[in-house]
Image (cartoon, rainbow, N blue to C red):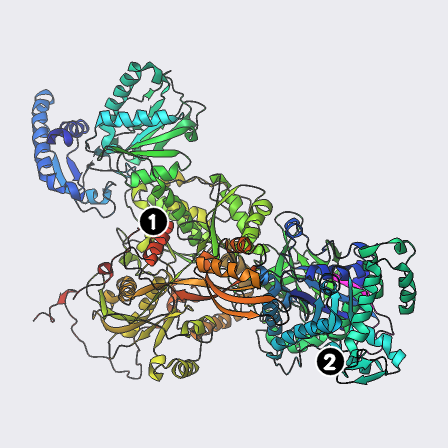
Amino acid sequence: MVKFTADELRRIMDYKHNIRNMSVIAHVDHGKSTLTDSLVAAAGIIAQEVAGDVRMTDTRADEAERGITIKSTGISLYYEMTDEALKSYKGERKGNEYLINLIDSPGHVDFSSEVTAALRITDGALVVVDCVEGVCVQTETVLRQALGERIRPVLTVNKMDRCFLELQVDGEEAYQTFQRVIENANVIMATYEDPLLGDVQVYPEKGTVAFSAGLHGWAFTLTNFAKMYASKFGVDEGKMMERLWGENFFDPATKKWTSKNTGSPTCKRGFVQFCYEPIKQIINICMNDQKGKLWPMLQKLGVTMKSEEKDLMGKALMKRVMQTWLPASSALLEMMIFHLPSPGTAQKYRVENLYEGPLDDIYANAIRNCDPEGPLMLYVSKMIPASDKGRFFAFGRVFAGKVSTGLKVRIMGPNYVPGEKKDLYVKSVQRTVIWMGKKQETVEDVPCGNTVALVGLDQYITKNATLTNEKEVDAHPIRAMKFSVSPVVRVAVQCKVASDLPKLVEGLKRLAKSDPMVVCSIEESGEHIIAGAGELHLEICLKDLQDDFMGGAEIIKSDPVVSFRETVLEKSSRTVMSKSPNKHNRLYMEARPLEEGLAEAIDDGRIGPRDDPKVRSKILSEEFGWDKDLAKKIWCFGPETTGPNMVVDMCKGVQYLNEIKDSVVAGFQWASKEGALCEENMRGICFEVCDVVLHADAIHRGGGQVIPTARRVIYASQLTAKPRLLEPVYLVEIQAPEQALGGIYSVLNQKRGHVFEEIQRPGTPLYNIKAYLPVIESFGFSSTLRAATSGQAFPQCVFDHWDMMSSDPLEAGSQAAQLVTDIRKRKGLKEQMTPLSEFEDKL
Amino acid sequence: MDFESDYEIARTAEFLLSRNFTRVALQFPDELLKDSTRVVRALRDQLRSLRKCGAEQNGGNKDVRLFVMADTTYGSCCVDEVGALHVNAECVVHYGHTCLSPTTTLPAFFVIGKAPVSIPNCIESLSSYALTNDKRILVLYGLEYAYSIKHIREALVEASKLSESKSKLEVCFADVSCSVMNSSDDHRSSTGLVEPAGVCTDDNTYGMAPDNRYKIGGLIWTLPEGHKMEDYLLFWIGSDNPEFAIVVLTFNCCDIVRYNPKENRLVTDVSQQKRILKRRYYLVEKAKDANIVGILVGTLGVAGYLHMIHQMKDLITGAGKKVYTLVVGRPNPAKLANFPECDVFIYVSCAQTALLDSKEYLAPVITPFEAMLAFNRGSQWTGAYVMEFRDLINSSLVEVKESEEARFSFLSGGYVEDVDLQGKEIDKEDKGTLALANAMEKVLQLRDNPNSLKKSRARSGPEYFAARSYQGLDMHYDNSLPEPYLVGRSGRASGYEDEKK
């Protein structure tokens, strides 16, 4: 009973003004997937009756089982508007047919990388908020992410049915709740002022807020009601809409609108009077099976029911009636069509965020104009496992030009540098596919502005890539996505049977592809490591690895491992010196901690090796109090030349210093990657080269002499500067009722966490708690918390910062010393740290 | 132990006389060097007395000249042929620990020495260990314990006869392959096994299928037909040395225990050695990402080393990487750090010195076998490990069908380009008139970001140097007049003559 064919869809793809690419984003359990279902139902892919129960976009067995979305899933919908409905539409359009490329995304914070991938290829976002729980942590996170990508949001206040059935709140109270939800969302959006994007806040009276009940498949915007009443009151629709929200009151007794409650018992707010109450009435009638009352009312509303539907009872009847009266699909789809930008509109302002190259070259222009005749610019944002095991679809968005079956494309990977051959492949597309829920349809080509899945490129793309035509050798790639979470939790995996190793290797390769965030790497000790954003994320990854990517071969996983960082607390107690192996060269160094915030600035890329030295010294002197001249003497950053540690030259008048710079830098890169304590990365250490004595002959101060010496003197200066361990810390947000607070506090205390914010949600008995929790203590935190609060508290953990552990790792028996020993043991190093005397030499 | 039997003076003298050698090099490792004069004296006396009786039989005979060699260039376990050839020696007598790697030109005689072992104690641990398992046991040992194996085996047979209940005990012993080695020119005629082959099982038979013959280091053994190595428990008598590490790596699927003769106890925990295998695996993965490879020549004696070096060169250039061959003697971190442009080193040497734990090195050092895994596209690590490179020569690894897929690097967690495969295609376009212009462009690009060492990994030595911040002294060419002639310094680095005051 599919109401449309792939051909039809393909036809509309050419009308770039009639396309809407949008993602559905929200906090976990606010009803994204369920709401998406009702939209899909409208397109005729699934039956209206089951909409809300199928969760069409949860295609995986474990998604269905857990009731959460894990992967973002795309779906293309066809929607035809009536002329009448489009009457007030001012934008460009071509015909009444619309194509909506919708992507349902997960709400759990562990999977927010999926949201990032979804946002990249869409232009608008439907933000779903539970009307009772309100704007939650993840709502805020994803909303910020969307706005950062210049994605225009519309809002839907979901789970309206809870107001009517579960909570039975009266109209005014409900209005206040909704108002607060919208205000909270607007507070976040208001911080993103963007002249190009315009005002991104949402207003019910402008039709950018919908009210929905995903489970029951109904929704409305004020437009629906305004249309209904406009003729009755003889005012125009726009005017009516304004009256239906805000401080507009109507007294049916006097038939007068006022801007204040007159105090008369019949005087009610417009929204309550004309929207909330009628719905409440209908629902109550249905629930009580007062069919005698129902039919005339429906007739008045112009709702006709099929005869077999009239036999339904109670909830089923209510659902059916509401679906017919206020179908979710038309309310939401119309809202999207009216208020979300078409690719043509959106790409005009998004091009700046998207394109890495000069904004006036042909590629930038093609993206800006969404030009199907221009050069191909396609961004692959994620890889989707295909039905034949081991292969993947490359899923992405065409920003300019057309991609077609058989086309030879240039694949620019994330490490591609224009003009070089690194991370660059030329391959042909085997098939172009569009997604229609659970099944895919092959089409000849896909023009710009649409989402597409490509077959045959998966052996060259790990996670994301930019595709252009074979000939476009001077195109720059599209900017890489920035994730809000980072993979801080790691497990080591190995196969039970040693000869399964090739299977494991192959499996890890596929796992790395299937998820935008997961990192599969190998440790110095030879263990394969999977790193994910959180416990749940890892659990899903391991399950995928074993079941899907390794064909069930058994794997053994270690306990979760957290990586630490090594830093220093103070300046080195003295200048340390190391001699080169031939004893003819001496390096003198001191270590000191970097100024607060500087390591973060380096992480964010505000300060880095590629900066203009003038800009860098300005930031360093103004924000971090550095001496202007000193700022010019930074030799390098590390590890990996960009890390948050540096070497600064403090020498005065030393001969041959420039000759050994490269060698010292090489030694520093090496040492900062493997610190002296337990070979973890260093963080936030500044090494000052105080003095250097070199042999007069170049041959005796070569790399062989200086590189190992630089490494040793760096270790020595680290060990004399009160070395400390940094541990990763989660920001935990918990929403729970008051009676659960005791349990939350006790669990947090027990896990070394501390609460720094506790706010009661206005108008609800719910509390919002923010706390810091060491990542290492977070394993099993969710389940402990659930047990301690009888399931009322649900935490969301995001990596926040590195926290210094106060205990001294050099002091035997301290907590940090124990940790160091454990890490060394795990890495197969000598359990005893190498003593300072091994690194420092005496004159 | 007395000196004469320890150094097998009589046997050595007999061997030298039987072959009519006149110039003989005696190679001592550092720790035995102190005994060298005594050995030479004893040997000379022995030779003289032997020749006396020999001369009576068959007339005049030339004097045998003995030379002592020490401080071997590479590992002291290998025969230093080059050193011996300096004195035109006809034969090398090698003392002390040896890897028994085949020699290229000279015959060699090995005096391995004898380390004390408590036989009853060893048997007790062996039989008590055997009882805890129902697998068969294969006994391997360090060569310095070879002399005691005969006694152990006899004692074990005795013991099993005494207690009938334990007759299920099945123990195989490995044999020492030879103590005399002819050069590989006239190979395959290696004389005399020290001891006749023997298998101590109940039925006392063993199959002779050639694929059941195993050889590792100086040990050789044959398994009964139909048995695989995985069916055996390995019992190692000896210390925790490279020899043992090789056994653990090669038979990584077998359970291994070690009997420590020095402390008379059984060491069942060999996880440290198992870790080595994983660590090697990591190094292979790391090597896959390398662009510039250095081949370290670690032997000039082991037969086939030149062939191996050529094979490695072909392999690496075939994989589209740049290769440099380096001869640095015994490698150490400081020496190798003089070549910071190399991302990985391949150490071509005898098996026992090849396993360098390169933790202290700037770039990892791997063995030729690991290099084959790393640079042969599509080859996979299946757990098998080959240590000695003569086994590697001509051995083609299991080739997995050449897939089109780009190479996945576990170090960076994503696909990485393979310069070669990509490069070939695109380079073709560069040929012709534009080639120079393109090359210029690249040079300019490299200069753009000179302030980091490893940002964009160089693909050859010159590229690496071009990216360095220090480009050498500033040459001032304005002055075209010839510089005056100056006398340089003389003396040694620790203090030149003009510095001494």
Residue at the spot 33% in from the left edge and 74% down from the top edge: A648
Residue that badge 1 annotates: B347
Residue A71 at what x, y percent from top left?
A: 63, 57
Chain of the residue where label 2 is placed in the rendered structure:
A
Vertical placement of residue A568 versus B160, above or below? below
Instruction: Name the secondary structure under disc 1.
Output: strand
Q: Is residue A218 visible?
A: yes
Give the magenta-colored segment's residue range. A76-95
Q: Is residue B193 visible?
A: no
Residue A290 in the figure: left or right of residue B156: right
Vertical placement of residue A612 versus A458, above or below? below
Secondary structure that dominates the magenta span? loop
Vertical placement of residue A213 versus B271, above or below? below
Q: Relative to the observer, which residue lies in front, B355 or B101?
A: B355
- Labelled disc at residue A246: 2
- Give residue B224's quadrant in the image: top left
* Labels 1 and 2 in the same subunit: no
Q: What amino acid is labelled 1 in the image? A: Tyr
| Image mark count | 2
Question: Is A736 contained in the magenta span?
Answer: no
- Give residue B325's quadrant in the image: bottom left
